[in-house]
Amino acid sequence: MVLFRFTVFFLLIAAGVCFAFYIGTGQQKYRLWGLKILKWAVIAGLGFFGVLVLERVL
């Protein structure tokens, strides 16, 4: 459980850093990286909450 939390947390921080670089430099590659990382953060978060729901059910 702790691994999921750290993974989601660090993915969100990495996405935020990429978006900050995009704002600072204006380079599209940072925006694209940020969106890709954000997508994986959402997937990891859904996996985390899925595990929580399965623990409650079982």
Image: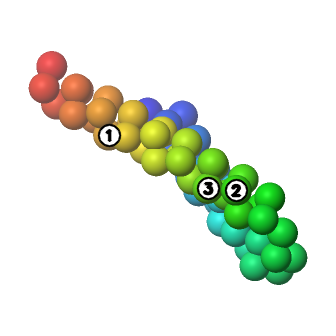
Query: Is residue 16 toward the left or the right of residue 56 in the image?
Result: right
Can you identify the residue that label 3 sits on?
35
Q: Which amino acid lies under the numbered mark 2 shown in the image of this protein?
A: Leu
Q: If the image is split into quadrants, where does the N terminus sit?
A: top left
Can you identify the residue that label 1 sits on?
49
Q: Is residue 48 above or below residue 25?
A: above
Can you identify the residue that label 2 sits on?
32
> Looking at the image, can residue 31 be seen?
yes
Q: Which amino acid lies under the numbered mark 3 shown in the image of this protein?
A: Leu
Does dot 2 land on a helix, a strand or a loop?
A: helix
Instruction: Give me the disc on residue 10.
Output: none
C-beta proximity under 8 Å, tags 3 and 2 = yes
- Mark positioned earlier in the residue sequence (3 or 1): 3
- Rendering coords of residue 33 (x, y %): 72, 53
Depth-wise, is mark 3 or mark 1 nearer the camera?
Answer: 3
Query: How far apart, in angstroms, are the residues tagged by discs 1 and 2?
Result: 26 Å
Depth-wise, is mark 1 or mark 2 nearer the camera?
Answer: 2
